[in-house]
Image (tube, grey):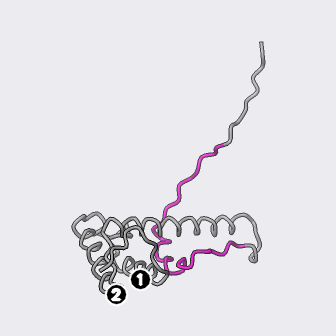
Amino acid sequence: MADNTGQRLSSEQVGYLIELYHGHEALWNAKSKSYRNRDIKDASYRSIQTNFMEKFGVQLTVDTIRKKITNIRTSFVRELTKVNTSRTSGAGADDVYVPSNEHFEQLIFLKPVVTFRKSLTNLIILVSLPLF
């Protein structure tokens, strides 16, 4: 039984982790009745941990699973933002961004629950004031 806390997961392992995560709606769907139930969420993470261990013989802590899922979601949102931006920029169909994340399509179930924040500009606007 190996502890894989600080190591990278293989593509197959990431795909299986996503599959397990998708099966536990309480972890990702804010509209689910069980989304706010901490006991159900904890049980879901333990279930993912057990199933992952049974398939790969790799023991991940619940904290590690949460961090890996957070990283996977962050990567998905980043790629989805690039796709959406390229579509709305007036680019032609050939110029639409193609996600580089190999698990992007597997994560598409998150699209309805992802929210985007409006970014603030980091540009400094100089205002000319009359000198008296």
Q: Position of residue 13 (x, y in %)?
A: 43, 81
Q: Earlier in the sequence, mark 1 or mark 2?
A: 1
Identify residue for label 2. Answer: 55
Q: Position of residue 34 (x, y in %)?
A: 27, 69
Q: Which disc, if any, is residue 37?
A: none
Q: Quadrant of residue 96?
A: bottom right
Which quarter of the figure is the N terminus placed in?
bottom left
Q: Residue at x 69, y 65 (%)?
A: 88
Identify residue for label 1. Answer: 16
Q: Residue at x 50, y 64 (%)?
A: 74
Q: Is residue 7 left or right of residue 35?
A: right
Kindly give the residue lying farthest to the bottom in the view shown. 55
Query: Bounds of the magenta span?
Result: 96-122
The rendered magenta stretch, by its main secondary structure, is classed as loop
Q: Residue at x 46, y 82 (%)?
A: 15
Q: Secondary structure at mark 1?
A: helix
Distance CA(mark 1)–CA(mark 2)? 9 Å
98 within the magenta span:
yes
Q: Position of residue 16 (x, y in %)?
A: 41, 83
Which quarter of the figure is the C terminus placed in?
top right
19 within the magenta span:
no
- The three-letter code of the residue at mark 2 reads Lys
Q: Residue at x 53, y 67 (%)?
A: 75
Q: Is label 1 in contact with label 2 (beta carbons under 8 Å)?
A: yes
